Amino acid sequence: MHEFTLQHFIFCHECFQHCQSFVCAVNVVAMLHNFWEQKQTESLLLYESAPSPGPPYICYVTLPGGSCFGNYKVCSSSSAEARRDAARVALMNSLVNELPCRRINPQFITQSLQQAVSIEDACDSSTSIGTYSLLLHSYMGRTMLEFQEMMTIFQLLHWNGTLKALRERQCSRQSVIAYYSQRGLDEYMRSSMALDWLGREHSSPGRLGEELQVAQRELVLARRRGVELRFCKEKTEILSLALSQAYIHHTPEQLRVSPCLTLPVFLPVYHVIWHVIFLNGY
């Protein structure tokens, strides 16, 4: 098992280095478009430039499945430079995601379960780790990026307190997973979460601004690391939506948000995320 894992790690690392060199030498925006066009996906690539009167410029690109990436370089010349850099990060991740070592297979599932808890507990579907095992098996043969896209929804539900509320209503883990794993993240869900945070702001004035600062810091640091951004970006947008509604009822002084974005925040990998969500709360 250890030899297999090490060989695959070395293989993936070497392929990543080749992809990185290749991506730097091509028209990345066109290549990213062609890559997903060949997959015949119904959704389109979505580029978003962060509002800015001048440098540094920031751009995000959302892939058809929902994964989001941004420019990790400091782009000072133009928004087009930021767009190219975001496309480069997205293309590199898209190419690496096609590698065999990025497919969920029995070896990966076993390793993930061993890292979370004793492998014997995975046989019992009534336990949280058993539910994790069932979900992993349902994604057998699919890519880790696809699995992460689904996990983003559960991250948001956990962050928003929705999972806790469902547990208090005695909804089973299996039913919650079955429902939300088939449902995409839509405007209704975002609006519902924004209303939840608006209610928390009314109960505890100033909390919304503090949460938004934390989310912005997470997004900045994650973007600079070149990792997948959807969870951080969705949090920021949901909180911004709630804050825009809160401004209707409060003065700007009560909801002032500091522009300082310097505190370090580190995001866990997906199997650790699952452990936090379902072993410590659902």
Image (spheres, rainbow, N blue to C red):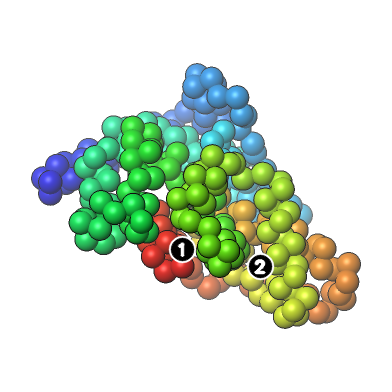
Q: Residue at x 22, y 61 (%)?
A: 118
Q: Amino acid at mark 1?
A: Tyr
Q: Position of residue 245 (x, y in %)?
A: 82, 63
Looking at the picture, does residue 261 appear above or below residue 231? below
Query: Which sits in the foreground, 257 or 119?
Result: 119
CA–CA distance between discs 1 and 2? Answer: 25 Å
Left or right: where does residue 282 sit relative to residue 58? left
Counting other residues with Cα less than 10 Å from the Cα at mark 1, is it few (<14), some (14-19), or many (20 or more)? many
Please tell me whether mark 2 sits on a helix, a strand or a loop: helix
State whether residue 144 appears in this view: yes
Earlier-in-chain disc, 1 versus 2? 2
Q: Residue at x 18, y 45 (%)?
A: 5
Left or right: where does residue 82 sit relative to residue 90? right
Please tell me whether mark 1 sits on a helix, a strand or a loop: loop
| Tag nearer the camera, 1 or 2 | 1
Reading the image, the residue beneath label 2 is 212
Query: In the rendered image, which quarter is residue 33 located in?
Result: top right
Reading the image, the residue beneath label 1 is 282
Q: Residue at x 55, y 46 (%)?
A: 180
Q: Residue at x 25, y 58 (%)?
A: 121
State whether residue 256 appears in this view: no
